[in-house]
Image (cartoon, grey):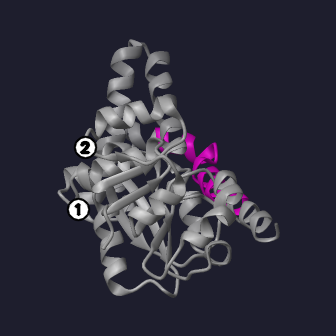
């Protein structure tokens, strides 16, 4: 029996977000969580947020104390430490990697187990509004899958995909917050150009994006249908949409998603061939 329900290898923003989510959702108390984080300043922050959690002195100790382990370190860090940790892995362990770009085949090779899950979360997980793509290794059983679903639903929505499709998940939702933030910034700039104060314009732009996304999520209606509902004949919206279409906004967003997807594939290929 493991001493802790959750083990986090790394204690950065995403690990903190997931830990907050599982505690808030009642999946675990902070007393059931252990972290290994070498940065002492980050350890202090974690100790304040999760006062009953255990701060481990070594990565090996973390592996020995918890059988469900979330590998929440940067890809290059995981590459550098995997060989020193592989001998700690037993059939008892379920490893969950959120390191971008490292395929299941490489993780299996590094850790000598197929009981591995890859997850591509995004930064809105920090506000419990994230989107996560999940791909399982062949050794991941039904209980493990249900556990993963519960954990990542505590910080947002979850979709099940193949390992290869995680590249597209990266292009849409992994990098996607940056596209939307750019849109909010542009909407706000447009409002300022039209005579609004920066504060008022940013508030309107932010709420408009949030409201439109909520409409799609709650109604299940295709965005094109909802867009038509606010596009009156010879009105203001159709004039604005004409400008956006002329500027190639739709095709630019599609190309941006494809560019991020292809870059993810390039990074994965470099790791695979290393």
Q: Nearer the viewer, residue 136 or 66?
A: 66
Q: Position of residue 29 (x, y in %)?
A: 21, 53
Q: Residue at x 49, y 37 (%)?
A: 181
Say if the magenta span includes residue 128: no
173 versus 208 height, above or below: below
Q: Residues within 10 Å of mark 2 (few under 14, many from 20)?
A: some
1 displayed left or right of 15: left
Q: Dot 1 corresponds to which residue?
A: 219
* Quadrant position of the N terminus in the picture: bottom left
User: Magenta residues?
Assistant: 240-263
112 versus 242 height, above or below: below
Q: Residues within 10 Å of mark 1 (few under 14, many from 20)?
A: few
Question: Residue 52: which disc?
Answer: 2
Q: CB under 8 Å between callouts 2 and 1?
A: no
238 displayed left or right of 52: right
The chief SS type of the magenta part is helix
Say if the magenta span includes residue 250: yes
Q: Secondary structure at mark 1?
A: helix
235 versus 99 height, above or below: above
Is residue 225 at all visible to an observer of this figure? no
Q: Position of residue 28 (x, y in %)?
A: 23, 58
247 displayed left or right of 174: right
Q: Position of residue 46 (x, y in %)?
A: 37, 37
Q: Position of residue 267 (x, y in %)?
A: 74, 60
Is residue 248 at all visible to an observer of this figure? yes
Kindly report which numbered mark, 2 or 1, lies closer to the viewer in this rendering.
2
Residue at mark 2 to residue at mark 1: CA–CA distance: 41 Å
Q: Residue at x 62, y 45 (%)?
A: 246
59 displayed left or right of 50: right
Q: Nearer the viewer, residue 189 or 129?
A: 129
């Amino acid at each position: 029996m493991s001493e802790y329900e959750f083990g986090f290898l790394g204690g950065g923003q995403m690990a903190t977000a997931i830990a907050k989510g599982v505690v808030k959702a009642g999946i675990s108390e902070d007393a059931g969580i252990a972290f290994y984080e070498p940065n002492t300043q980050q350890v202090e922050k974690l100790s304040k947020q999760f006062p009953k959690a255990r701060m481990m002195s070594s990565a090996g100790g973390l592996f020995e104390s918890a059988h469900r382990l979330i590998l929440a370190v940067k890809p290059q860090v995981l590459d550098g430490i995997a060989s020193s940790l592989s001998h700690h892995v037993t059939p008892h362990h379920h490893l969950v990697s959120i390191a971008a770009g490292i395929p299941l085949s490489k993780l299996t090779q590094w850790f000598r187990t197929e009981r591995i899950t890859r997850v591509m979360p995004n930064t809105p997980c920090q506000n419990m509004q994230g989107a996560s793509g999940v791909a399982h290794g062949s050794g991941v059983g039904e209980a493990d899958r249900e556990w993963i679903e519960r954990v990542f639903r505590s910080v947002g929505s979850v979709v099940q995909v193949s390992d290869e499709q995680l590249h597209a998940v990266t292009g849409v939702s992994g990098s996607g917050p940056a596209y939307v933030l750019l849109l909010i910034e542009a909407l706000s700039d447009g409002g300022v150009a039209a005579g609004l104060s920066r504060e008022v314009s940013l508030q309107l732009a932010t709420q408009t994006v949030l409201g439109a996304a909520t409409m799609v999520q709650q109604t299940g209606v295709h965005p094109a249908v909802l867009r038509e509902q606010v596009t009156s004949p010879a009105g203001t919206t159709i004039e604005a949409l004409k400008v956006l279409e002329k500027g190639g906004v739709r095709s630019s967003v599609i190309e941006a998603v494809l560019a991020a997807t292809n870059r993810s594939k390039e990074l994965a290929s470099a790791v695979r061939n290393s």
